[in-house]
Amino acid sequence: MSEKSVERVRFPGVTLHETVCVDENVVIGEGSKIWHFSHVLPGSVIGRNVSLGQSVMVGPNVHIGDGCKIQNNVSIYDGVTLEQDVFCGPSCVFTNVLNPRAHISRRHEFRKTLVKQGATIGANATIVCGVTIGEYAFVGAGAVVTQDVLAYSLVTGVPARWVGWMSRAGERLGPDLVCPRTQERYRQMEGKLAPVG
């Protein structure tokens, strides 16, 4: 049996390009697609209907929820968790220690990073370890996130700062807090945003 056939048996209903490397002790949900030169390390769990672009590295011990889309050239390291429907733009960066040195091992100092349901991380953004990005938040391209991001927030810049609110549909909200695409209404309470109803 060819190596490709073995992979089909291990992961039924999953599309794996022939250049993909999947280590042992990995779970990949049905309907997921992993493209050229990507690598999934041991202990990683990838949900259903996930798309990993070219040259993506996942793991070890990373959890990626259902429906996530990871664009090309993204590395998701130990300590990072993506809930469902997270979008990671091309070449966005996750770190896992605050003060790395080549000559000092800091594996025991990895900090946890959580990206909650529906959040978007723009191309070339950097997410410094130890933060939580809230539900449906939107991190602009090239931003550097150094602190937690509230749900539905739009943050941009270096370091990333709050510049507005976003809807679940990915539209910037105006003063009326109504999504221009879906007409879904939101309300602001105590500095936080939530859908009405």
Image (cartoon, helix red, strand yellow):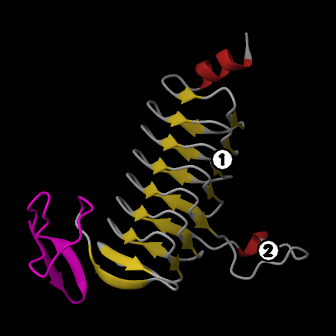
Vertical placement of 60 versus 6: above or below? below
Instruction: Report x, y in % for residue 101.
Output: 83, 78
Q: Give the Cα distance between marks 2 and 1.
A: 20 Å
Q: Nearer the viewer, residue 73 or 24?
A: 73
Q: Is residue 186 magenta?
A: yes
Vertical placement of 93 versus 88: above or below? below
Kindly identify which residue carries mark 1.
43
Which secondary structure type mostly characterizes the magenta part of the structure?
A: loop
Quadrant in the picture for the N terminus: top right
Nearer-N-terminus badge (2/1): 1
Instruction: Report x, y in % for residue 86.
Output: 41, 56
Instruction: Report x, y in % for residue 136.
Output: 32, 65
Q: How many marks?
A: 2
Quarter of the image for residue 184 reads: bottom left
* Amino acid type of the residue tagged 1 in the rendering: Gly
Give the residue at x 44% y 31%: 31
Q: Which mark is residue 123?
A: none
Instruction: Report x, y in % for residue 79.
Output: 62, 64
Q: Which residues are magenta?
A: 168-197
Kindly identify which residue carries mark 2.
106
Vertical placement of 155 versus 138: above or below? below
- Relative to residue 159, is residue 68 drawn left or right? left
Quarter of the image for residue 111 reads: bottom right
* Amino acid type of the residue tagged 2 in the rendering: Arg
- Relative to residue 154, is residue 130 drawn left or right? right
Quadrant in the picture for the C terminus: bottom left
Residue depth check, mark 2 versus mark 1: number of the one nearer the observer: 2
Q: Is residue 147 magenta?
A: no
Farthest residue toward the top?
1
Q: Determine whether the residue tagged by mark 2 lies in a helix, strand or loop.
A: loop
- Relative to residue 10, is residue 188 drawn left or right? left
